[in-house]
Image: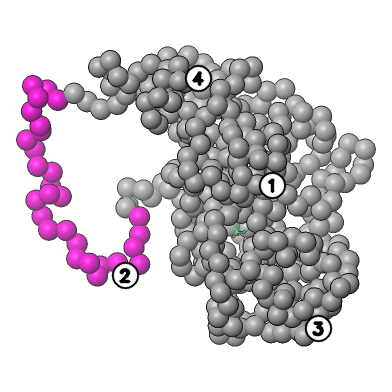
Amino acid sequence: MDRRNFLKSGLIGAGAGTLAAGTALANNTIPKEVPEWSQILGAGVDVEPYGLPSPHEAHVRRRNVEWLTASPESSINFTPLQDLSGIITPNGLHFERHHGGVAEVDPNEHRLLIHGLVDKPLVFTLEDIKRFLPVSRFYFVECAANGGMEWRGAQLNGCQFTHGMISCCQYTGVMLSTLLNEVGIKPKGKWILAEGADSAGMNRTIPMEKALDDCMIVYAQNGEALRPAQGYPMRLLVPGFEGNMSVKWIRRLEIGDMPWFAREETSKYTDLLEDGKARMFTWVQDANSIITTPSPEKVMKHKGYNVITGLAWSGRGAIKGVDISLDGGRNWEPAQLEDPVLPKCLTRFYYPWDWQGDGKLIQSRAYDDSGYVQPTFAKQREERGLNSIYHNNSIHTWEVKPNGEVENVQLA
Ligand SMILES: Nc1nc2c(c(=O)[nH]1)N[C@H]1C(S)=C(S)[C@@H](COP(=O)(O)O)O[C@H]1N2
Ligand SMILES: [Mo]
């Protein structure tokens, strides 16, 4: 936060001899005590060939919700957004969503078949895929059910649980358009069935326009091979669309002239409206945002200077701005976005405020470069009714209490 912006936001605290944080030295002398870790040799370089976080960070972990876990093989766990900095999700903290457990795929035996309405059906090994010109891009992956438990009341008191079905990584692979060019799509080929090699054989239909635009077959995530839970050795990545379409352990792409109307795009991943009709093929993850600090997990500890921070994203493009309200949506002020601000990627925002120990209803509202503005809770329910599970992206409210605790609340 540079000083000019800090002053512009009308806050006081830094400057004029007031500390934002830190402790003044007694008599200007530094402490004499030398801690134990400074007096003995540390561990050698070969102790841990694959590095792990400090044991003091053991609380930073994925968590699940018991009543959402029918069986561990068909379940979900959540990314601890409240404990992350910047925009990248470490691979070990990427949320997991499996329909038939984590497939244990042998990368040497795995094959990707592309067939159907093509000139020349082809089978690719992992080695084949890696011979193409690689592309590395930053994208979020978000389950359509992220925030879904909020439709019927504020049921979960934690940012990890209300919004943790999202992650953001740098993905490396080959553009799907490159592979489709190799097989040659027949003019009638307008849809692609994507199928996984897991026991669920999970499949979805992808429109050709999207496939040729920015879809990728990825094999690396944040610089290393995909983790087994994320689809090792290869997954389809459909940027900005609901996570369900990014088929893991991808083994087959069939080109057709119609959508397949697969289970995951008819019975599931559709939204039943009040009039009995259902929204279908609602692929895009609309603009959304969440304040990660303060949050139920990150309570207020200090009066005076504080920084509200959080994440915003849009499946339509780049985040254009994030506004913050401290009074339940009556007044709004812009937050500062941190570079890089990339399309279909998480964007970090900051908003300094002077907290005097009073109760507040804090919210963030994102808008993207398509002109789309994150809707209020009331507006989204007015449009969609109460039957939905998926695609809840309404403005979220945290109640900051005078004692510093933070609670998940919903404003009618
Ligand atoms: N083959 C296969 N692909 C899949 C799934 C699955 O169960 N099997 N789950 C989907 C769902 S619903 C989501 S939200 C994302 C989750 O990706 P992640 O587990 O890497 O977070 O993968 C999608 N791809
Ligand atoms: Mo999902």
- Which residues are drawn in magenta? 25-53
Residue that label 4 marks: 401
Q: How far apart are marks 1 and 2 (CA)?
A: 40 Å
Q: How far apart are marks 2 and 3 (CA)?
A: 47 Å
Q: Which mark is residue 49?
A: 2
Numbered marks: total = 4
Find numbered disc 3 in the image and state the secondary structure of the residue it sits on. loop
The mark nearer the N terminus, 2 or 3, is 2
Answer left or right for 375 relative to 405: right
Residue that label 3 marks: 119
* Amino acid at dot 1: Arg
Find numbered disc 4 in the image and state the secondary structure of the residue it sits on. loop
Q: Residue 145 carries which label?
A: none
Residue 276: image x %, image y %? 92, 42
Foreground residue, 134 or 24?
Answer: 134
* Amino acid at dot 3: Asp
Q: Is the residue indicated by label 2 positioned so its CB lies within 8 Å of ligand 1?
A: no
* Amino acid at dot 4: Lys
**Of circles 2 and 3, which is in front?**
3
Mark 2: give few (<14), some (14-19) or many (20+) Cα within 10 Å: few
Q: Which residue is drawn at 67% across and 61% down?
A: 214
Residue 138: image x %, image y %? 54, 56
